Structure formats: C-alpha cells, structure tokens
Image: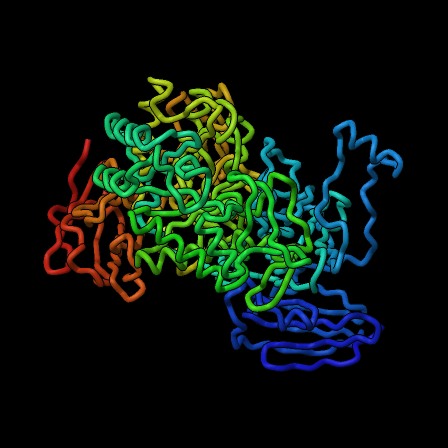
C-alpha cells in the first residue's frame, strides 16, 4: 500500500492511497486538525460552528512514504498504510493509531445461551452499535486517563468502560455500567503521560466508544452509519484543550441572572392554589428562591400548550401573582403532540405536514403522556419556526422559561423505528440519523421562539442533547433517584458535562425518584450548592422534599446554603460572562486546573468553582469527617480563614451542617448582598473577598437579562490587591448608571471601602479591621 497523491486546497489536504480509503485533513487552527473521509467535507455539522482559520501549516513526505502535516501546536503523520498518529509540538505522542487487530472481550457466552440468559433477566452487554460503518482504533498508554462524553454515568475517569451515543430514556436507577443515557456528546479528552488532547467524533448516528474495556492496549470508536469524521485537539493544558473544543462547537451563552437562583419543582403539585402556597411558604421561611417549575400536571390531559382550566382557571393572573412575589415560572413542554382531531396543535401540524412519518407516508404515532401522540419533525426549519411560535401561548401570559422533557425522543410503546422519515434541514433523512439531534433541534426551536417573543436571553432546559446544544439550552442529568450513589455520581456527571461544553447543568437535588431522607437532602444541597443549575425536583408517589418537609435542623441548614449561594451569584455570573468569551466552564474537576498532578486524575468527589473556590462535599451516609486533597499552592479555609499548604491530604471534620470549602490564595470572589430573590434593579454595593494578601480580579456587570451587553452595555471592574492594599478601577463603563455606589474589599480580617465619584472609585480608608 502506498500514497498515490496529495493535494492541498486552502486549509484542506487530500491524501489518496493505492489500497486504502482516501483521507482528508482540515486545519481549523494550530490546535485543531480535522481527520475525515473526503465525503464528510460536504456534510453540514449540527455541532461545529467554527470555520477553518488561516493558521499556517506545512505538508511534507518522509522517506518511508508517509505524509506529515505540522502546525505550531500539532504534528500529524499518516503512514503509507493509512495509520494516523498525532504528536504535540515537541513530537511527544498524543493520539496514535493501534497497529494490531481488535480482540473481542471474552464473555464466556456461547451463542446458544443468549436467549436463556435474556429470559432469565441477565441480558449481558447492551451495545447500541450492531453494525459498523467506520471505526478507528487508538493505542492506549498504561497511564492514560479519559474525561468528557457528556452525562455518561460512573466515575470522573472513564477509562476501562464502554459507552454508546444513543439518547435513551431509562427510568431504572442509573449506575456506573450504563452505556447510554439522555445525551450524546462525543467529545473525549485524554491525558497521555500528562499530555492533554481531545477527540471530537462529529457524527450524530449511533456510535460506540470502548475505552480500554475490551483490551488495555487500545481504545476504539465505531459508528453505525456515515463517514468517519473526527477532530484532534491539542494544547499545553487540559483547560486549553477544553476551551478549544467549546470554541469549535460554541460556548454556553450568558444566561439571565435570575436563572442562577434556587429553583423548586415537583411532579405532582396539584393546582394553582398549592403552587401559590409553596411560593408563600418559601417567603415565610425566608428561603432564597427565584423559580418555580410546573411539570405536566398543569396541562389539560397532558396536551402541550394548554392549561387545565380546573386546576389553573386563570393562568395569567396566577403567573402575575408569582411575579409580584419575586418568582419566575418555568413550564414543561414535551414533544409528543396528542393525536386528536379537534386539538389545535395537532390539527395545525397535520394540515402543514409537520410530523414525522413512516416510510409508507403515514404519520407515525407512539404512546407518551397524553396517549397516542405524534412527533414534530424538528430537523425542518419550518417546523422549528412553527414550534417556536407556539410558545407565544406561554410567554404572552408571562411564563419565563421552558423545560424540555421526553425529547430523546421517548415512546412508551418502545423505541421509534430507525427507518422513520425525518428531515435534515432541507434534505430527507431517517430517525437513525436524526435521533440524537431531536432534542438539539427542539431546543434550537424554542430558543429562537423565546428570544423573538421576549427580547431576553432565553431560559431553555433540555433533557436530551447533542454536542453544541449548549448554545441553546441548559441541561439536567434526568431522572436520578434519592440514592447515595446518585449523590456520589453528581460531581463526575456535572464536571464531565462541563468539560463537554455544557457549563450550565445541574441534577435534581434530593433525587427525582424514591424517598429522600433528611441527611441525604442536606448533603445534596451542600454538595450541589455551586452547580450552575440549582433545582430541587421530585416525583409524585415519592416523599416530598421541599426544604421545610423535615423540619429542623434540615430547614436551617438548607437556608444557610441557599444564602451562601445567593451571596456568590455575582461570582457565578462572572464565570458565565468569562466563559462565553473563553469557553471555560463554571464547575470544574480538579484535573482541569491541575492536570500535571497525578493525585487528581481520578478525584471525583471534589470540584473547583472557577479558579478561586474548591469544594469537597460529603457524599457518603453517616460521615463525620472526610479526607480532602489540597493541590499545589496555598489554600484558605473559607469558614475559618486558616491558611493551609497545598500538595497534601488533610482530614476535615464534617458535622451535618458543614461543607468543606477552600479559597485559593491569590484569587478573590465577589459577594453580593443577602437576599431572598434577585431583582432587575442593579446592586448598589459589592464586596470582594481576597484569599491571601494579593490577587487580581475582573468583575462583570450588566442588566442581567437583555442582549444589550453584546452592544457594549456592561461594566467591567478591575480589583487588585498587592501586599494587602486594594485598588478598584473601572475599565469599561457601558452602563454607567448601574455602577456600584460602594465597593468593599476584604483582605484577611480587614476591609477597605471605595466610593464612586465620577466613574472613579476613591478609597475612604486604608484599612478597617473587622472582628
């Protein structure tokens, strides 16, 4: 086998072989090289929004008949047999093709035993990919570690497991061996001998990843249909690789500020009177809360875009009353439209040919909550426009956000057939190709509708997603349960989602299914208090878990951490504002910030919030102390102010009301006022806490809801502390009216006050000691 021809056009290099399929290489940037079959170049990606830059590169032939492509960050080599190897700028290995053959895992399962095993309830392995269109096998280093892949269950390091990308609604308790869940986000990060890289496999069809489970010498990716198409991403740090990926597929946009507040929900709230009482009780107990959610109970017979006139006789007045108490309202919307002539949404969709069909041309039905239902063909632009427009029925009466569920898509009568007729923009397609894009396109439709109808940043939550869905929606991890193992899985799931581009994510606090306990609920709110989406949600038929249900001390502890959350919302908002520009996530695994520390590569029970705070929640029942690893540097106990050296493991006492929390010396965080809900009025004052006696911080401020910031309507503040002395500078005043009247900088036990005078901050005193 030899290389027959090499052609270069713009940023693309085509390589033809005598006895191997052709390969195309596309240089997107110095850090990103696309490797694909030539036919993939003509396909439109639903995930990638970046276009190839004019990054310089060179191409040369070697003496062994291979081809090398070099950028300033990556060196890629293809040998005469078509093997693709990628190295960093120092020619150290990142991703190498495996030269051997796959050796299937020995399951000791004779073919004639399959049916017996399945009947007995032990189905064995469950792989979504039974046929393979294309495959790559990569060599696995003994110390290689894997991260990313969206919401996949299990541990922070994915090595040794296998996964399928096929969006799936599974109501049974999610455990570490699950191969697939609600989202398909095929971005895989690796650390090979401490060198980071990313592999993004951009094919929305069924795909499979085996990360060393089949054989410790290799990992592989296979896809059921379509051409091979993947991106190799390099960079000096794991953080830089993650940020390159989010620039490729789009960062999470800056959300409305109130979406970072606490959110309460339950499937089973009966009517407007009960929800109003929930709201009143929140205020009566002084529990900070901004959002209430309505599950499918509010609809008339689970018909989307309707209200149950008995339970909610005056929905507009109901929403207005909630707004007057400082609450926003989010309503659920499922994709399944009840198949019922006379129901306006169904009639409209049928009349305009908006629903998915069988190969025979009949509208396809399956059973979901309203009974027999039909599915909008969200891949068609006209259907997305129609669906988005229908949300005016909600926004017109003041509904503030929309929560998408059941959009894998799910069906009570079994999976949708692969051969159903879908649309991919303007081209006919099939369910097999569009399945993983169903939730993505549904979210895209609603985002556009809400933006057009309200003029504000849309708040859309989705259960199902594909790579790039972060541009349109926040996500949650689906139907978890009130189990300690699900609390333990929260940190790895949310951190891997964050690495996968989904910076705005959360879990159902307390667990959606089963019965929570006071201890579990307390530890859950403590552990999740910095998760970007902070929602307590549970299901009818299970114990209720509003914060007051268990009385004291649960109520007071819950309130304590909600108050902490609200004081630190300005910090979370800063992280979102920065993340829209850089792609950096809000919630981060330790390996993101300390990828050269071998001690952190498998730590999944601690996490960073930005670069300033490290959280070590209690995730096990009955614990009164826990070990905490402090990475290199210096740290300060958030609660006591004690200075601690990094590079060591310490034991911390953790009574029921304790959350180990540490500030990284040399950083600082803004802290807003104590409040029970967020308003549109700008804060008049802001505090900044510096960890240690030095640090620099950039603080962002805008109106918290509109898109005016994209036209420069925002303020930037530079806070510096040197040798314990603070200074405050306004570096951009795009909304001068909203500038803080007073700023206080806290360094140790002292504070320094600054007051606004003609868009400049003047120090009132050098230092003021605070007891």
Q: Residue at coordinates 28% horizontally, 28% vertically from top-left?
A: 277
In this picture, residue 718 sits left or right of residue 430 = left
Residue closest to the far front: 342
Q: Position of residue 20 (x, y in %)?
A: 81, 70
Q: Is residue 442 above or below residue 732?
A: above
Q: Position of residue 156 (x, y in %)?
A: 57, 41
Q: Quadrant of the C terminus?
A: top left
Q: Nearer the viewer, residue 269 or 487?
A: 269
Q: Nearer the viewer, residue 218 or 253?
A: 253
Q: Nearer the viewer, residue 147 or 175?
A: 175
Q: Position of residue 119 (x, y in %)?
A: 78, 30
Tell me if I can see residue 694 in this picture: no
Q: Is residue 296 above or below residue 595?
A: above
Q: Nearer the viewer, residue 43 or 331?
A: 331
In this picture, residue 466 sits left or right of residue 390 = right
In this picture, residue 73 sits left or right of residue 462 = right
Quadrant of the rendered image containing residue 23: bottom right
Q: Residue at coordinates 50% horizontally, 26% vertically from top-left?
A: 482
Q: Quadrant of the N terminus?
A: bottom right
Q: Residue at coordinates 53% horizontally, 26% vertically from top-left?
A: 483
Tell me if I can see residue 351 in this picture: yes
Q: Position of residue 222 (x, y in %)?
A: 72, 55
Report the number of discs.
Answer: 0
- The colour scheme used to paint the residues is rainbow
């Amino acid at each position: 086998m030899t290389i027959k021809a090499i052609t270069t056009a713009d940023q693309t290099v085509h390589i033809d072989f005598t006895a191997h399929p052709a390969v195309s290489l596309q240089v997107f940037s110095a850090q990103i090289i696309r490797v694909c079959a030539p036919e993939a170049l003509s396909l439109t990606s639903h995930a990638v929004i970046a276009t190839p830059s004019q990054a310089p590169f060179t191409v040369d032939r070697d003496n062994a008949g291979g081809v090398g492509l070099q950028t300033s960050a990556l060196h890629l080599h293809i040998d005469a047999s078509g093997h693709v190897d990628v190295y960093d700028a120092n020619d150290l290995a990142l991703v190498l093709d495996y030269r051997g053959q796959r050796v299937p895992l020995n399951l000791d399962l004779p073919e004639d035993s399959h049916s017996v095993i399945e009947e007995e309830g032990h189905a064995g392995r469950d792989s979504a990919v039974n046929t393979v269109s294309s495959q790559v096998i990569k060599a696995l280093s003994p110390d290689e570690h894997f991260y990313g892949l969206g919401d996949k269950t299990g541990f922070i390091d994915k090595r040794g497991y296998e996964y399928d990308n096929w969006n799936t609604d599974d109501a049974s308790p999610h455990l570490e061996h699950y191969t697939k869940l609600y989202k398909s986000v095929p971005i895989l990060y690796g650390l090979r001998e401490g060198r980071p890289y990313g592999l993004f496999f951009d094919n929305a069809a069924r795909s499979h990843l085996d990360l060393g489970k089949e054989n410790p010498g290799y990992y592989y990716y296979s896809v059921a249909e379509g051409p091979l198409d993947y991106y190799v991403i390099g960079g000096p740090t794991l953080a830089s690789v993650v940020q390159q990926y989010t620039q490729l597929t789009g960062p999470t946009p800056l959300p409305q500020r109130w979406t970072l507040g606490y959110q309460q929900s339950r499937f089973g709230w009966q009517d407007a009177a009960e929800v109003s009482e929930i709201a009143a009780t929140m205020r009566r107990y002084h529990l900070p809360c901004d959002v209430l959610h309505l599950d499918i109970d509010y609809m008339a017979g689970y018909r989307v875009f309707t209200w149950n006139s008995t339970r909610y006789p005056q929905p507009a007045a109901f929403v207005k009353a909630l707004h007057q108490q400082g609450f926003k309202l989010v309503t659920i919307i499922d994709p399944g439209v009840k198949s019922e002539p006379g129901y306006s949404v169904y009639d409209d969709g049928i009349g305009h040919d908006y629903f998915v069909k069988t190969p025979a041309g009949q509208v396809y039905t399956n059973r979901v909550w309203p009974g027999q239902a039909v599915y909008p063909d969200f891949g068609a632009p006209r259907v997305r426009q129609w669906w988005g427009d229908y949300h005016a029925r909600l926004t017109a009466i003041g509904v503030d956000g929309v929560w998408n569920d059941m959009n894998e898509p799910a069906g009570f009568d079994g999976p949708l057939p692969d051969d159903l007729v879908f649309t991919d923009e303007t081209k006919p397609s099939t369910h097999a190709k569009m399945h993983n894009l169903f939730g993505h396109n549904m979210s895209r439709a609603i985002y556009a509708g809400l933006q057009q109808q309200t003029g504000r940043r849309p708040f859309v939550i989705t259960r199902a997603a594909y790579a790039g869905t972060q541009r349109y929606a926040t996500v949650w991890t689906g139907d978890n349960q009130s189990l300690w193992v699900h609390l333990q899985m929260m940190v790895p799931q949310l951190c891997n989602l964050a690495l996968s581009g989904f910076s705005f994510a959360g879990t159902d606090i307390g667990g959606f299914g089963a019965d929570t306990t006071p201890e579990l609920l307390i530890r859950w709110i403590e552990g999740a208090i910095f998760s970007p989406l902070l929602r307590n949600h549970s299901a009818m038929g299970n114990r209720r878990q509003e914060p007051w249900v268990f009385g004291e001390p649960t109520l007071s502890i819950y309130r304590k951490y909600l108050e902490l959350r609200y004081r630190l919302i300005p910090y979370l908002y800063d992280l979102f504002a920065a993340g829209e520009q850089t792609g950096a996530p809000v919630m981060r695994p330790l390996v993101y910030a300390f990828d050269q520390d071998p001690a952190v590569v498998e730590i999944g029970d601690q996490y960073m919030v930005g670069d300033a705070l490290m959280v070590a929640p209690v995730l096990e029942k009955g614990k009164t102390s826990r070990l905490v690893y402090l990475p290199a540097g210096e740290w300060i106990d958030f609660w006591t102010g004690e200075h601690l050296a990094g590079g060591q493991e310490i034991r911390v006492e953790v009574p029921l009301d304790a959350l180990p929390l540490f500030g990284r010396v040399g950083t600082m965080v803004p802290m807003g006022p104590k409040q029970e809900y967020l308003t549109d009025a700008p804060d008049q004052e802001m505090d900044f806490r510096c960890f240690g006696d030095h640090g620099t911080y950039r603080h962002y401020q805008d109106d918290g809801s509109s898109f005016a910031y994209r036209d420069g309507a925002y303020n930037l503040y530079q806070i510096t502390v040197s040798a314990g002395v603070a200074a405050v500078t306004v570096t951009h005043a795009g909304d001068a009216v909203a500038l803080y009247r007073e700023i206080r900088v806290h360094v140790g036990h002292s504070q320094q006050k600054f007051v606004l005078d003609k868009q400049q901050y003047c120090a009132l005193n050098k230092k003021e000691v605070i007891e």
